[in-house]
Image (cartoon, grey):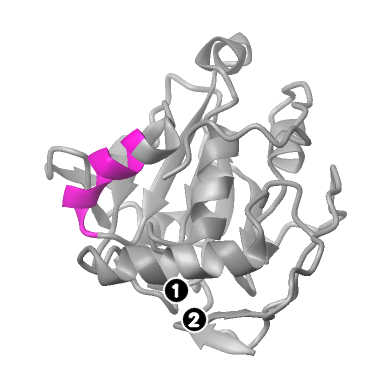
Amino acid sequence: MSRYGDTAVAAQDMPVPTIDVIERMPETGCDLERLKSCILYDADRNRVRFEDIMDAQYSSTIFVFLRHFLDYVTRDYAEDFAKIFKHELEKCSCRIVLIGCSPARHIKQFIEHTNCPHDIYCDSSRTIYRALGLHQRTTEFPQGPSPHVKTNSFIGFWQTVWRSMNTTQQGDPFQMGGQLIVDNKENLLFFHRDTHPYDHTPINDLLKVVGLPRVDFKTKYRIKDV
């Protein structure tokens, strides 16, 4: 086995099962009041309070907390969020917000590489990650299942290594992500802490919570390969 950061991969190509829905009970214990004062940064490096992002004009908001921007699993996940059109979200007054732990100066490049149209912010100090209790330094790395990771694990690992050798650090490689859905009355609709890189909630599970139709993510088509 080879290891880079928290990413362990097999030397041989191991198939990743593709599934539509993972049955998962939402977690509890998320204190939204504690999150409100956390500071994030937008693509122009402006300070933004998390409270201001919880815009009451939307009936619900899906917050997606990402791992570091160089990780191929993170990029594949973000590319599939890019397949959800904003006009579909507007039908149920919903929006998607992605939050990374990279320095904010890397947001524009990440958008370019993933073609993601949704709002993206960064918390390089990981203040909000700690407030949510998102996991770090996991020892788990199963080879699936995830309907969103289309990159071969062996190739993806070396892509991650190559990117890390040719650019500056773009987030904590040991930080796991998570997903959070709240409504405009600040009710917690869904919360999940990832226990390993492949443990992100399938997007169709998130869409079901807010009443949006399912999206077919089984295609091998990649929005942009870098």
Of residue 153 and residue 51, the one placed in the foreground of this image is 153
Q: Residues within 10 Å of mark 1 (few under 14, many from 20)?
A: many
Q: Name the residue under label 1.
A: 175
Spot occupied by residue 78 in the image (x, y as percentages of width and height) = 51, 43
Left or right for 205, reference 135: right
Residue 71 is marked as none
| Residue type (three-letter) at the residue carrying disc 1 | Gln
Q: Where is residue 18 in the image (x, y as percent from the top left)?
A: 83, 50
Give the residue drawn at x 69%, y 29%: 210
Estimate the x, y position of residue 64 in percent, counting from the top left: 51, 48
Q: Give the range drawn in magenta.
A: 103-112
For residue 132, say whether it is visible: no
State the residue in front, 193 or 5: 5
- Residues marked 1 and 2 touching at CB (< 8 Å): yes
Quadrant that contains the C terminus? top left
Q: Residue at x 76, y 47 (%)?
A: 147
Q: Check disc 2 and report its element: helix, strand or loop.
A: loop
Where does the N terminus fall, quadrant-wise?
Answer: bottom right
Q: From the viewer's perspective, is 9 left or right of 99?
A: right
Residue 226 located left or right of residue 88: left
199 vs 108: above or below: below
Residue 207 figure quarter: top right
Q: Earlier in the sequence, mark 1 or mark 2?
A: 2
Mark 1–mark 2 distance (CA, rounded to whole Å):
5 Å
In front: 11, or 79?
11
The residue that mark 2 highlights is: 136
Residue 15 left/right relative to 156: right
Type of amino acid at the residue the image marks with label 2: Gln
Most common secondary structure along the magenta stretch: helix
Q: In this view, does 102 lie above or below 208?
A: below
Position of residue 26 relative to residue 1, above or below, is above
